[in-house]
Amino acid sequence: MNLCDFAPEYIRSIQPYQPGKPISELARELGLNEAYIIKLASNENPLGASPIALDAMINTLHDIALYPDGSGFELKAALSKRYDVAPEQIVLGNGSNDVLDLAARVFLKPGAAAVYSQHAFAVYPLVTQLIGANGIAVPARDYGHDLPAMLDAITPETRIVFIASPNNPTGTLSGEEELLQFMERVSRDVLVVMDEAYYEYLPEASKPDSLKWLKQFPNLLITRTFSKVYGLAGVRVGFGLTHPDVANLMNRVRQPFNVSSIGLVGALAALRDAEFVQRSYALNRAGMMQLTDGFRKLGVEYIPSYGNFISFRVKGAAANTPKVYQRLLQQGIIVRPLGIYEMPHHLRVTIGLEAQNTRFLDSLEPILGELD
Ligand SMILES: *Cc1c(COP(=O)(O)O)cnc(C)c1O
């Protein structure tokens, strides 16, 4: 036996997460200039980060020899005020992916199960599998979560249900009423993780009042992130809001310094820059119109999205999809193939700056013309 053969089967069979292709990698592969490449592959904020957050992070560099505040006192105080929860209800994470992982490590074990939707965020099956627990993928309905079917899929072994709303990569939103009904019906012995990474991109009228449910349901964990509208994907800060008892367990499991000092300071400043959030939201709404108008003109089918991205269908055989992906790469445009999401006909494009969206659409048109 080789050492690696002793690793559990559920570890050896993990399919690694496939991130969007980095700009530097494409530049190397095709000999392109990095400045020419646009990455619309990871739902990053095309405006970058808030200038206020940038300044705060640059100032923190002077103290980089010191460990961060492992409790995240100041950031938690600000989040507590903003969201009207006690600091004891907050779990900070190295990105919200870390929070998802903590939830899995607290509540799952081999033999336990987690329920999630088909076409849902790839991190749910990943964190489930690395515990050796069973993942139950429930068939989607019109690319969205079929919440009644997910409720039915819960077994006595199920400890977590993951719900992404809006979901990535489909952009679908579960209705407030439907979510509330789910919470009312689901057993209190099951943790419901509501992943709201794209919450800030929702128009006010579409925002569910999910924070309010924390008072009513001790088995709810809401996760949010600084990676999307706040433009801080590179520093890795996310958080979970939940019942203090759940937060307590998750905080025992996390690494003592799981959020860096730069991340803590950047997130705190970003939270205060409402103008930047508003500008990012408005840019996204305009870009969403621009892309969906463009798709309609090109006769491209797309899944209406509530996020900062949109998944569109490449006509014809599934083999056309990697072709379009590759042809876009050659033009210096990186989008995301969705094969691992069981969507072999779709590509996902992140909404960029107006000029980037234009270049994407202008490049796409002749490429689609080449297909049979
Ligand atoms: C981007 C994204 C996240 C956020 O990940 P971070 O670890 O916070 O960068 C979480 N959930 C979904 C569905 C996402 O698309």
Image (cartoon, rainbow, N blue to C red):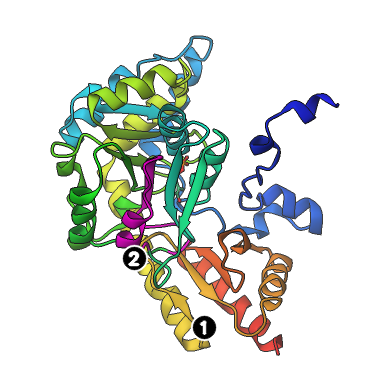
Question: Of callouts 2 and 1, which one flags the residue occurring earlier in the amino acid sequence?
Answer: 2
Label 2 sits on what residue type? Arg
Label 1 sits on what residue type? Val
Residue 368 occupies which quadrant of the picture? bottom right
Q: Position of residue 254 (x, y in %)?
A: 45, 21
Magenta-colored span: 145-170
Q: Assign a secondary structure to mark 2.
A: helix
Q: Position of residue 268 (x, y in %)?
A: 32, 29
Of the 4 image quadrants, the one containing the C terminus is: bottom right
Kindly tell me whether residue 248 is visible in this rendering.
yes
Which one is nearer the viewer's eye here, 116 or 275?
A: 116
Q: Residue at x 62, y 63 (%)?
A: 339
Residue 164 is covered by the magenta coloring: yes
Q: Nearer the viewer, mark 2 or mark 1?
A: 1
Q: Position of residue 175 (x, y in %)?
A: 24, 62
User: Which residue was labeled with disc 1?
Assistant: 300
User: Which residue was labeled with disc 2?
Assistant: 285
Note whether 25 is above or below 260 in the view shown: below
Residue 56 is covered by the magenta coloring: no
Which one is nearer the viewer's eye here, 157 or 236?
A: 157
